[in-house]
Amino acid sequence: MTDTTRVFRKFGGFLFRVENDVEQPLLRALVAEDEAQSTAEGIFVPDARIASFAPWELKQLGLPPAAPFRLQVRGEGAIATEGFRLMVGLLRSDGRPVTGGRRDGVVFKSGSREYLLLNPLYEVLEKASSFSSASTMDERMSRWCDLRDLLPEGSVVDRQLQTINLVRGDAFTLDIKPGADFDPVLLSVANTDASDDHGEDREPSEALPESSQETFSERFAKGQKVNGHYALGGGWYVTLPEATRSALEVVREIKRSPLNERQAFIANPHAVLKDRLEETVDEQIIDSLFLEQEQFLSSRIKCLGVWQPKICAYVPNKEMEWIPEDVVAFSGKQLVGVSIDNNYFNIALDDAPQLVAEIEQGRAEGKQTVSYAGQSIPVGEESQAALLRLTEKKSSSTASTRNEDETETESEELVPVLIDNLEELGFTANKRTTSVSPGGLPSSLKTTTLYPHQEQGIHWLQSSWAEGMPGVLLADDMGLGKTLQVLTFLAWLKEQMEAGAQDEKPFLIVAPTGLLRNWEKEEKIHLLSPGLGTLIRAYGKDLKALEEQGSYHRTQALREADWVLTTYETLRDRIHNFLPVDWAVVAFDEAQKIKNPASRMTDMAKSLQTDFTVAITGTPVENSLQDLWSIMDAAHPGLLGALKDFRNVYQKPAEEKGEVERARELRKVLEEQVCPPAILRRMKDEHLRGGVFQDSWH
């Protein structure tokens, strides 16, 4: 009680009478927020709200002080039996039990002293008082799970209850496996106290350790129904609330259904769950029960669809015209550049139907190539599909020549459909914001004697990262240590992550199969153990083992790795493994593998979500300036504009008309339009002659 406020204990709360018309801001705010009730007698505040007050608020309102006690929790009997009793008491600061006390809601009287039980003491004691009414094992498990989550630090819990790892399956996601099989992965929402926005926006996390989750999956698959609780061994128990149980019952039924039903469920789990549960479970609850995994992260991806070979974006004649959408505008003798298997082939439109038939016959006879106009065209599905597309553009009547088995396959893999920047600029990478400063070598670097050009290359990579650049092209000549420079940069960045200056994310290195072992070897040579950290080999037999884990655990493994190695072919054919991961850096070694802007391999490389891309190649231009555009569109999308414009502004003038000035302008864009420059290229002969490489972008 204060000089202006009188306080009375009233059943279930306190009544405050404000005298002399003195304002009491705290009480007024409680009334305004409907957390207290204004009556003729005064302002009534319920116990539950009193329990959430801070000690200074108690003093301001003239209430008793907060109880200086700890909780003691013990069980009598086995929790799995009906006779189990939960005993909750209070301990003094010296560990002695508080005896002879009496609790009246939020008020606790001990001898002549009166205290208030603030949260979480109050909440725990309230829940404990209702524990005895639990009549089933499921109810006891669920109530203990709720109560245990509220226990504050310093609570004394007996050995039996300590050894019980009890979790609640608040939600689940799907671990999708080969053959349209799947298992539910249980998730829990961590307890949040009242100061944390009353639990809003809480992200669920895995409820069980891996071994216990595997045990649950086995019992779930074999069971005739979904139980309310599961004893999983090793002291682990999981309880399933009624809504979760209902949703998992749907999953269990579909898991045992024919292939087409399982595929439909995997394609849209939310829709199936809503359809099956709409009469028994509220729609908002259904939304919170199932956590859908993100299939891709990159904003460059428009959607997932069936990849279609692109008709190459040029006609190789004197004018180098761009192919319009309707190729009927061209004469039948017009040669069209068609992209097949990472190469271009010049084909007359009128010859395309006959060539389709020859490729089909070649496939039946087991041939590797067919000859056409002095060119060896690969025999395969990609060739046939590309040529069929070409004939469809010429005349819709040729569509009937397509083999039905190829147009309507049982299950075509969905891959990213990109904003490809070919005809118009639709995607430009934005700068990131960073809080790191370039400079210095990582402490894990073994090879401390570096050549000047290597030190400059490392500093260039650090500066490009620190400036928030989306990516760069390291185009040093062979033998100048490109791998060493990139490894040193990655080790430096890893140390920035460990220091908290950057979010911890994995690195992905894509290289031809023969070079992947070299990356491992170089990492061991140049970096002290543990080097870049945990490595996952996502190719060959290791990829098979990775994919057998299922989609959820595979994605978790990749996200938790420090660095990942894979091949271009794996990226092309198994891109779904890499799309849900937010990579810190993606490095493309021998980046000329993505020089063809019309190939599937290039599209898949450009579909990854990454903070920073390093394209690595000693030959950025093998056949045409278009090679350079394609590589840079992966490393720094938008810098060189759309391919159509690039061809008109730079490629045609430089390559066909010999306009050297246009080539100089292109170099200026790469080296001066952004800072640091987007490309770094040094030649071995310059280095051997003692040439100095100036980093004027400092």
Image (tube, rainbow, N blue to C red):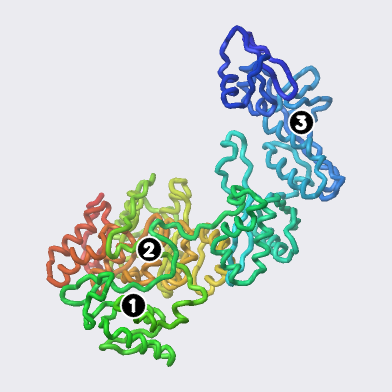
Tell me if mark 1 has few (under 14), some (14-19) or many (20+) residues whose alpha carbon lies within 10 angstroms of its own. few
Residue 281 in view (yes/no) = yes
**Position of 34 relative to 517 (above/below):** above
N-terminal label among 3 and 1:
3
N-terminal label among 2 and 3:
3
Residue that mark 1 sits on: 396
**Position of 629 relative to 163 (above/below):** below
Q: Secondary structure at mark 1?
A: helix
Residue that mark 2 sits on: 418
46 or 1, which is in the foreground? 46
Tell me if mark 3 has few (under 14), some (14-19) or many (20+) residues whose alpha carbon lies within 10 angstroms of its own. some
Tell me if mark 2 has few (under 14), some (14-19) or many (20+) residues whose alpha carbon lies within 10 angstroms of its own. many
Calculate the distance from the C-alpha at mark 2 to the C-alpha at mark 3. 63 Å
Amino acid residing under circle 1: Ser
Amino acid residing under circle 3: Leu
The answer to which image quadrant residue 594 occupies is bottom left
Question: What label does residue 91 carry, if any?
Answer: 3
